[in-house]
């Protein structure tokens, strides 16, 4: 279920869900998914591990709901079925809850774009390249 999910989980994934039926036939599933995630800092590529525990709420409509079309993006369940498979829905909720832009520290200086030196650890002798000349026209408009 968790193959190809980035970032990776560094421990067990604990899923705590409670399902209830609504008066109009929907099934409402609420709960949490908890685990530790391993990321790479988006600035310096250092490993980052954090606790991940999003709250999830999912609503499933009966497949015989009037006006429901196949192209609708609603979660649907077979009203005659004895079980409700939540695996894909939970996986989707987890993937959408993961922050894709994690940094190891808000003050992270990142890697030097020229030589790749981690600027949090050491400094390099690379010089900053001047502004891209393609932006000069816009810069001139701004100065007017």
Image (tube, rainbow, N blue to C red):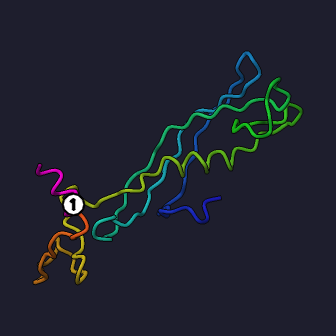
In this picture, is 23 found above or below 65? above
Q: Is residue 105 left or right of residue 20?
A: left
Is residue 135 on the magenta stretch? no
Name the quadrant containing residue 112: bottom left
Residue 36 spot, x, y in % from top left: 44, 56
Dot 1 falls on a residue whose secondary structure is helix
Residue 88 spot, x, y in % from top left: 68, 49
For the N terminus, give its image quadrant: bottom right
Q: Is residue 12 left or right of residue 137?
A: right
Residue 79 spot, x, y in % from top left: 85, 31
- Taking the spot 89% from the left edge, 32% from the top edge, the residue there is 80
Q: Which stretch is magenta?
A: 136-144
Q: Mark 1, residues whose alpha carbon is within 10 Å: few (<14), some, or many (≥20)?
A: few
Residue furthest to the right in view is 80
- Circle 1 sits on which residue? 137
Magenta span main SS: helix
Q: What number of labels is visible?
A: 1
- Taking the spot 25% from the left edge, 81% from the top edge, the residue there is 116
In this picture, is 57 found above or below 26? below
Residue 44 spot, x, y in % from top left: 28, 70
- Camera-nearest residue between 94 and 63: 63
- Taking the spot 68% from the left edge, 49% from the top edge, the residue there is 87
Q: Is residue 87 left or right of residue 77?
A: left
């Amino acid at each position: 279920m968790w193959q190809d999910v980035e970032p990776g989980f560094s421990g067990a994934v604990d899923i705590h869900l409670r399902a209830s039926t609504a008066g109009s036939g929907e099934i409402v599933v609420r709960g949490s998914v908890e685990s530790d995630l391993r990321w790479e800092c988006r600035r310096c590529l250092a490993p980052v591990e954090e606790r991940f525990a999003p709250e999830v709420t999912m609503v499933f409509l009966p497949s015989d709901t009037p006006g429901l079309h196949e192209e609708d993006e609603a979660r649907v369940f077979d009203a005659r079925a004895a079980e409700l498979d939540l695996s894909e829905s939970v996986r989707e909720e987890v993937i959408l809850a993961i922050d894709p832009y994690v940094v190891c520290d808000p003050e992270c200086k990142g890697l030097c774009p020229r030589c790749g030196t981690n600027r949090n650890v050491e400094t390099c002798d690379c010089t900053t390249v001047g502004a891209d000349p393609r932006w000069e026209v816009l810069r001139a408009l701004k100065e007017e």
